[in-house]
């Protein structure tokens, strides 16, 4: 058993998820020796603070991975595709938060509360981090699946602007400012569209609106985000027969994804028992007392680590189904936190 | 066959739905003789414009219904409960847009595109208008039910502020103004809550948020709105075995409810065939070309009459299920327009 603390590289340290990552690494129990910050050459040389110390950002290069034990990637798919194998070749385990490797049969897709053990089964030296929408619900659903056996999931999402990065956040703030003072807006077709101006990364205005689209067009009219929710849920739960339908919708919320989930199980369920089971599940907080206005909402959940669950009800017409409303911070558990948790599982291999 | 045009009373003429009603009565083909406007005594004496003419609002009293053939009620449940029978006693047919009579076995619940014929079967002299959330989807679902036979509905709503009346609209505008200029908001738990001030009719802030609650608490944790979607869908479709699960969520949209619907049928369905069927259904517009950013959103639908449907997909894992995204103006088809349509069906009895 070595006593050397492993070396971590954070690739994409200057991005929206990267900055949350530095915050998370600064507040969690420290399991790392050196933390190396890496970004594209144009961001190199910046000095960022992690664990209370200023660290200079280094440009992405093969040599930057020399001596690195774990390399986290918070970068676009094509950057991960090129550089994760380089990090592995130089001796690191890559933990990737892009979509590049999630459905690769040789790469485990890990949520530590659900399938931490799969981290060790990584023939390519890469471990993948799920999409933020899947991550906002899967910890809670994993706990229910373990107890009752999931057969069907019907998911409707209420996704935050920061799922589209800083450009999404800026677009929502810009548009909100433009519609804020004209109280006639929202009552005639197109009036909000004329007022907001630039659509940013979205196909329709987001302020005072909801937009039933996220990602790119996939087979039969499904969006890439909807297919990710289906395919990733199946892979994480190890349940290739799970039937999943998702409709992904962007809403004018800055950060924290919400989901209305209708979950059907192998056997009858009771809401009270499910509530107790969720309350004792790691990484889940139950907030469920509508009489006292207690249910999760994104503005209260943002900045926190757990998956919040409320509105836990058994379907009136199907004793095998539960209806739930879940919220999770898409930049924390939905991205940086889960990546950090995976990296910590791997760090455990080094430190015993 | 009489040639006398029937007399209409609009009770609640000064409210949010009432003012949309006057607009609708002014633009639809005229089937009415006199139109009498009625409101609470404190609004009586106001002069409102309908069909291009100024009409003085009369105070609610038994005598105001003398000579009236059809009396529309856009008032709270308790006012309808007291006054609809008075109108009937004085010889009118009451068309009620409150929740007072919707589930009454002696009162038909009518959506003319779906079950117009039931208007005649009114032993109490009252015809009921469905809840706005049910109305935002039921015309489209009625068409699909007729073709394929519905077995299950899973509904997640994205409900607009005007579903809570003018107070809801004002609250959303007030809160939007308060969060418009501080670009740090929405990134820390509670920061929006501190900024918005008054919650108005909602249990949590609505600006930059979504709130998984609408209505009052009913059995087993369901909200009244969720139970209405279930019970009213069953009654309108005449399908007492239909399994329905709904999660109703308020979003920061001024007017127009949206719904993500997962509908399961008796037999296999094809998205293309369903799309054609919906495109030819009365009262439905299909807007479904994601590649061209074509799908309904509330800011584009507000102020229009039809139910708009997009994102029509067959479930990847169940050939008997369709996923849809629907938008309907909750003040027009969701309230005033459907009431006007029912009243016109009844007017047809007078004019042949």
Image: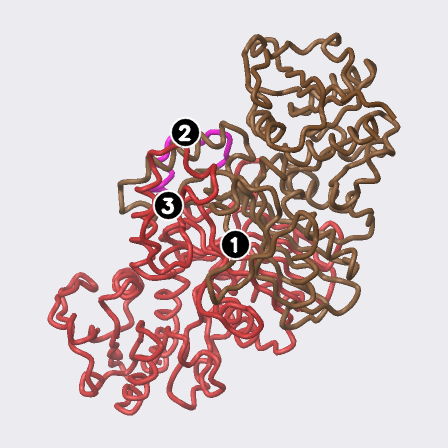
Chain colours: A red, B brown
Task: Kindly indicate whether the residue at mark 1 contacts the one at mark 3 (C-beta within 8 angstroms).
Answer: no
- The span picked out in magenta is B190-203
Mark 1 vs mark 2: in front = 2
User: Is residue A284 inside the magenta stretch?
Assistant: no
Residue marked by disc 2:
B198
User: Is residue B191 inside the magenta stretch?
Assistant: yes
Q: Chain of mark 1?
A: A
Q: Chain of mark 2?
A: B
- A285 w.r.t. A99: above or below: above
Horizontal arrangement in the rendering, residue A332 relative to residue B146 (left or right): left
Provide the secondary structure element on which disc 1 rests: strand
Residue at x 56%, y 57% (from the top left corner): B287
Residue A276 shows up from this direction: no
Residue at x 64%, y 40% (from the top left corner): B225
Residue at x 29%, y 65% (from the top left corner): A21
Q: Which mark is residue A326?
A: 1
Q: CA distance from mark 2 to mark 3?
A: 29 Å
Which of the two labelled residues, at mark 3 and mark 1, occupies the earlier sequence position? 3
Horizontal arrangement in the rendering, residue B39 relative to residue B115 (left or right): left
Quadrant (top left/top right/bottom left/bottom right) for the C terminus of chain A:
bottom left
């Amino acid at each position: 058993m070595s006593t050397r603390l492993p070396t971590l590289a954070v690739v994409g340290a200057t991005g929206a998820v990267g900055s949350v990552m530095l915050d998370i690494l600064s507040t969690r129990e420290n399991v790392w020796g050196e933390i190396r910050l890496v970004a594209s050459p144009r961001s190199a040389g910046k000095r960022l603070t992690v664990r209370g110390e200023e660290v200079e950002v280094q440009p992405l290069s093969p040599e930057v991975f020399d001596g690195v034990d774990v390399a986290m990637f918070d970068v676009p798919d094509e950057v991960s595709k090129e550089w994760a194998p380089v990090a592995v070749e130089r001796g690191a385990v890559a933990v990737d938060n892009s979509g590049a490797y999630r459905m690769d049969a040789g790469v485990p897709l890990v949520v530590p509360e659900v399938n931490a053990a799969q981290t060790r089964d990584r023939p390519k030296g890469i471990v993948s981090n799920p999409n933020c929408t899947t991550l906002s619900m899967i910890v809670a659903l994993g706990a229910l699946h373990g107890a009752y056996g999931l057969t069907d999931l019907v998911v409707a999402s209420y996704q935050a602007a920061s799922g589209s990065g800083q450009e999404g956040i800026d677009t929502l703030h810009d548009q909100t400012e433009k519609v804020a003072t004209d109280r006639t807006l929202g009552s005639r077709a197109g009036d909000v569209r004329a007022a907001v101006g630039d659509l940013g990364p979205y196909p329709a205005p987001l302020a005072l609106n909801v937009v039933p689209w996220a990602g790119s067009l996939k087979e039969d009219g499904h969006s890439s985000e909807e297919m990710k929710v289906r395919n990733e849920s199946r892979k994480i739960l190890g349940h290739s027969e799970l039937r999943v339908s998702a409709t992904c919708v962007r809403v004018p919320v800055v950060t924290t994804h919400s989901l209305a989930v209708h979950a059907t199980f192998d056997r009858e369920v009771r809401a009270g028992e499910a509530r107790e089971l969720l309350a004792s599940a790691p990484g889940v907080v139950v907030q469920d007392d509508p009489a006292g206005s207690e249910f999760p909402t994104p503005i209260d959940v943002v900045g926190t680590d757990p998956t919040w669950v409320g509105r836990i009800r058994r379907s009136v017409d199907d004793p095998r189904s539960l209806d739930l409303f879940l919220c999770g911070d898409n930049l924390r558990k939905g991205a940086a936190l889960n990546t950090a948790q995976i990296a910590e599982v791997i760090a455990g291999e080094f430190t015993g």
